[in-house]
Amino acid sequence: MRHDWAERVSAVWASAADLADDDLVAAIDALAAEHGPDDAAAVFETASARDYAGREQEAEPLYRRALELGLDEQVRPRAVIQLASTLRNLGRAEESVRMLEQNLHDHPSDEWTGPSAAFLALALVSRGDERQGASVALAALADYLPFYAASVRSYAVELLEP
């Protein structure tokens, strides 16, 4: 049942661009109701739907609840990134920065490093630390460059010098 449920959730997300925001939220809520209010994955999906629909105030406590309930290691970093992004959008850049820095500490070199760095760069800019944000973004980007990676890393560090 869990696999079938995940496939149905994925199908809703695959059609998200064709759905009105309220219809997406309703579809995800209906699927989440199959698992109840204490299922971390279901709560995470309801938070994500509200976030997608621009309803960050509603998404924040749901993200926190999903994390509290114990998301698996494949979903947890995603939830942290999404919650941090939501907090930034709600004007709480400092909290967003702290969460994303911790996420980078917990995932220093895996598939979550780049996404965490990207959202950290945005949060730093929102906090008013544009140079630090650019440095974080360039340092993360350097890992994906076939050429000039060392130079870009060096420039990223240089941005932080007085």
Image (cartoon, rainbow, N blue to C red):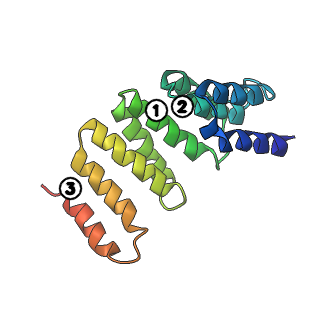
* Sequence order check, earlier mark of 1 and 2: 2
Residue 42 rendering spot, x and y as whole percentages: 71, 32
Q: Quadrant of the N terminus?
A: top right
Q: Which residue is mark 3?
A: 160
Secondary structure at numbered mark 2:
helix
Give the spatial CA distance, label 2 vs label 3.
33 Å
Kind of residue at disc 2: Asp
Q: Nearer the viewer, mark 1 or mark 2?
A: 2
Q: Secondary structure at mark 1?
A: helix
Q: Circle 2 sits on which residue? A: 51
18 is higher (above) or lower (below) than 153:
above
Q: SS at mark 3? A: loop
Judging by the rendered image, the residue that carries numbered circle 1 is 86
Spot occupied by residue 70 in the image (x, y as percentages of width and height): 66, 36
| Amino acid at the residue labelled 1 | Thr
Please determine whether, in this image, residue 105 is positioned above or below residue 141: above
Image-based side of 154 in relation to 22, left or right: left
Camera-side residue of 26 and 4: 26
Q: Identify the mark nearer the N-term, 1 or 3.
A: 1
Q: Position of residue 80 (x, y in %)?
A: 52, 40
Label 2 environment density (alpha carbons within 10 Å; few <14, some 14–19, many ≥20): many
> Do residues under tags 1 and 2 come within 8 Å of each other at their CB atoms?
yes
